[in-house]
Amino acid sequence: MTSARQSGTALQSDRKHHLVLELILEKDGDSAEHVMREHVRASRRALMAGLPIGGSNERFGTAGS
């Protein structure tokens, strides 16, 4: 399952990707880069917030493997 689906933000993520595409088509590379970098940062924060503390894999059913 993707982080977007886990956090219920799949629609928001899709909108960000469409915005980036629109900005690219408008030849506004600086804005497209800014929007995508912010999107990636937010996705990383959401992913990291869901990881278990200390690197344990117990949450994912792979403890000890």
Image: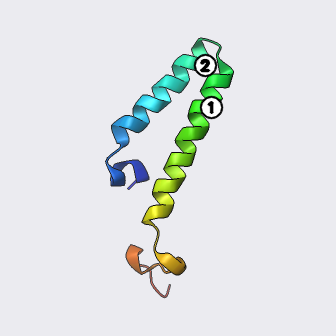
The quadrant the N terminus occupies is bottom left
Query: Which residue does the image show at 51% across and 55% down from the upper left?
Result: 45
In space, the residues marked 2 and 1 are separated at their CA atoms by 12 Å
Q: Residue furthest left?
A: 8
Packing grade of label 1 (10 A; few <14, some 14-19, many >=20) is: few
From the top left corner, tell me how far across and down residue 10 is, in percent.
36, 41
Please give the label number shown on residue 6: none
* Residue named by callout 2: 24
Disc 2, SS: helix
**How many labels were placed on the picture?**
2
In this picture, residue 43 sits left or right of residue 6: right
Is 1 rendered above or below residue 55?
A: above
Query: Which residue does the image show at 53% across and 40% down from the upper left?
Result: 39
Please give the label number shown on residue 34: 1
Query: Which residue does the image show at 35% across and 49% down from the upper left?
Result: 5
From the top left corner, tell me how far across and down residue 57 is, in percent.
47, 78
Cβ atoms at labels 2 and 1 below 8 Å apart: no
**First reached walking from the N terminus: tag 2 or tag 1:** 2
Is 45 rendered above or below residue 13?
A: below
Packing grade of label 2 (10 A; few <14, some 14-19, many >=20) is: some
Identify which amino acid the numbered label 2 is placed on: Ile
Q: Residue furthest right?
A: 30
From the top left corner, tell me how far across and down residue 11 is, in percent.
34, 36
Q: Quadrant of residue 25?
A: top right
Query: Which residue does the image show at 42% across and 53% down from the upper left?
Result: 3
In this picture, residue 3 sits left or right of residue 25: left
Closer to the observer: label 2 or label 1?
1
Identify which amino acid the numbered label 1 is placed on: His
- Could you say which is closer to the camera, residue 44 or residue 61? 44
